[in-house]
Image (cartoon, rainbow, N blue to C red):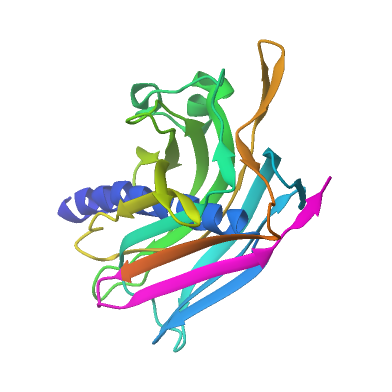
Amino acid sequence: MHRAIEGRRAIRALAAAFAAVLVLAVAANALAGIVKVRIQAGNIVAIGEGGFTPTALPKNVDAPITIFGKGRLTTVDGSLPPVLKTIEFEFDKHGSVQTEGLPKCSSGQLQATTVPAARKRCPGAIVGKGSGHAVVKFPEQPPIPVSSPITIFNGPTIKGDPSVFAHFYTTVPAPVAFVIPIRIETIHNGRYGYRVNAEIPKIAGGNGIPLSGQITIGRKWTYKGVNHSYINARCPDGRLQAVGRFGFNDGTVLRGSFVNPCKTRG
């Protein structure tokens, strides 16, 4: 019984951790226009692929884009990576998140719901979908695989900034839904205009490890006769970029500055 309760807690915490990891990493990859990226510090390696469509953007005004990506954590020696504790990304200021007229979903609407039920309750607020994979590794036991569909819902503003809810549902080892809020904070830091960060909760006494996932984020709608897009970007100087930092429980820190050319169209 004790192990079953601990397992359920692990899945809830693991969902929270992986939501933050996946959304932040994919957003950074896509807004930086990255096709492939590999970051290594000691034994730990983060590998990702991401991008956006269309790739040609106006010079001075934002245009609609859809971002997509996938990524995984691994190690040089093939062992499980250490536990991820913190993550932070700053994004290029030449982009924007738009929510005018887009329906919002509340945390209460998503609690204790399966994936189909959550999507049925807030269909108009969905801005992204994907999936995540992880393991829970208890001492002297083989790793327990965990996977979950991911749904990203438009949430309420937080201190004037947009936010999203990442929703997970899993049946291993017992049916559990988890909802995590993520704020998209406006900043003024030179090249960077947006920041997202998260402190990853301790998972099953440090035994839960997010490993991989994929996601696509993009939504278009019409409000008061005007077309809108959730994710937008422009290309004023031939490049888009982002900077990220991952901190692990063994003291390792992965840092990456991502710069990639973009195409300017008239």
Residue at the spot x=56%, y=31% of the render?
98
- Residue 263 inside the magenta-drawn segment: yes
Residue at the spot x=29%, y=50% of the render?
13
Give the answer, above or below, for where 24 lies relative to 43: above
User: Taken as a whole, is the magenta stretch helix, strand or loop?
Assistant: strand
Examine the image and state in which quarter residue 203 appears: bottom left
Q: How many marks?
A: 0
- Residue pushed farthest top? 224
In percent of width and height, residue 244 lies at 44, 64
Q: Is residue 176 visible?
A: no
Residue at the spot x=34%, y=44% of the render?
174
Classify residue 67 as left or right of residue 102.
right
Q: Is residue 197 visible?
A: yes
Give the answer, above or below, for where 258 lies relative to 264: below
In percent of width and height, residue 196 lies at 40, 49
Quadrant in which the C terminus is drawn: top right
Range of residues picked out in magenta: 248-266
